[in-house]
């Protein structure tokens, strides 16, 4: 990863891509975990100022996005047959 | 050949008329799936639903949400929250907002306008 500054737009784009990928998981728990983990990680790093630290966090996020994309496909092959009780419209 | 003829002579396959219980191609009542002409959202409905999505966002003080509110200037949210709100609106209206458009939506007004003009919003 070059040390060129990462623009605000690129970071927001990565954030949105991760949240979009999170929505693709069939399993409620994994879907919610991925979303929660994305939000937490961006919040944790939102005050980074060092450009090296920012690019390290950014490239880590990119790797995680690739992992999430791949796992969304893999897990779709083993989708749970019953929905989580959390997804029930009314109890 | 003789054997084949003998076998064929003795075997009888009962002929049944295949009849489907329901005809899948028939129009099902008044529900027209995939049709974008019916039930287009009214402006009031879009306003109500957008406001309620924004109000239900955890960091937002519900009493300060109006249809004209600006997410970052008036509600004290940041750009990450802005992305989350736009994603929540996508889920509410079953839309996929392209990134370029999503970046521009930074207030209730713009969100309402975009969703109201979107042909697939539901």
Image (spheres, rainbow, N blue to C red):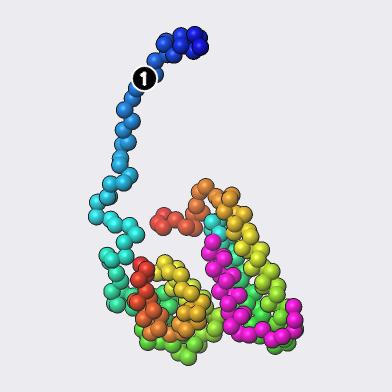
Q: Is residue B114 above or below residue B96?
A: below
Task: Say which element carries label 1.
Answer: loop
**Magenta region includes residue A20:** yes
Q: Main secondary structure of the magenta part?
A: helix
User: Residue B83, percent across and down?
Assistant: 52, 78
User: Residue A62, percent across and down?
Assistant: 67, 72
Say which quarter of the image contains residue A7. bottom right
User: Residue A54, percent across and down?
Assistant: 70, 82
Res B51 visible: no
Horizontally, is A43 left or right of A50 in the view?
left
Q: Chain of mark 1?
A: B
Foreground of the two, A74 or A81: A74
Judging by the rendered image, the residue that carries numbered circle 1 is: B14
Q: Is residue A44 above or below residue B5?
A: below
Magenta stretch bounds: A1-24
Determine the residue positioned at 39% across, 15% down: B12
């Amino acid at each position: 990863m070059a040390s060129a500054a990462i623009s605000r737009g690129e970071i927001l784009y990565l954030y949105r891509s991760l949240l979009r990928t999170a929505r693709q998981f069939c399993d409620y728990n994994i879907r919610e975990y991925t979303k929660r983990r994305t939000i937490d990680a961006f919040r944790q790093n939102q005050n980074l100022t060092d450009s090296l630290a920012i690019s390290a966090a950014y490239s880590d996020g990119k790797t995680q996005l690739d992992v999430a994309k791949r796992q969304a496909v893999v897990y779709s092959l083993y989708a749970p047959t019953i929905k989580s009780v959390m997804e029930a419209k009314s109890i | 050949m003789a054997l084949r003829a003998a076998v064929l002579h003795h075997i009888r396959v009962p002929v049944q008329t295949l009849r489907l219980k329901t005809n899948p191609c028939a129009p099902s009542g008044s529900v027209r799936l995939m049709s974008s002409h019916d039930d287009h959202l009214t402006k009031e409905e879009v306003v109500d639903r957008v406001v309620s999505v924004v109000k239900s966002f955890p960091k937002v003080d519900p009493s300060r949400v109006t249809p004209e509110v600006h997410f970052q200037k008036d509600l004290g949210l940041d750009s990450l929250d802005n992305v989350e709100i736009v994603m929540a609106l996508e889920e509410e209206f079953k839309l996929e907002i392209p990134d370029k458009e999503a970046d521009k939506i930074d207030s209730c007004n713009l969100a309402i306008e975009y969703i109201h003009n979107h042909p697939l919003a539901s």
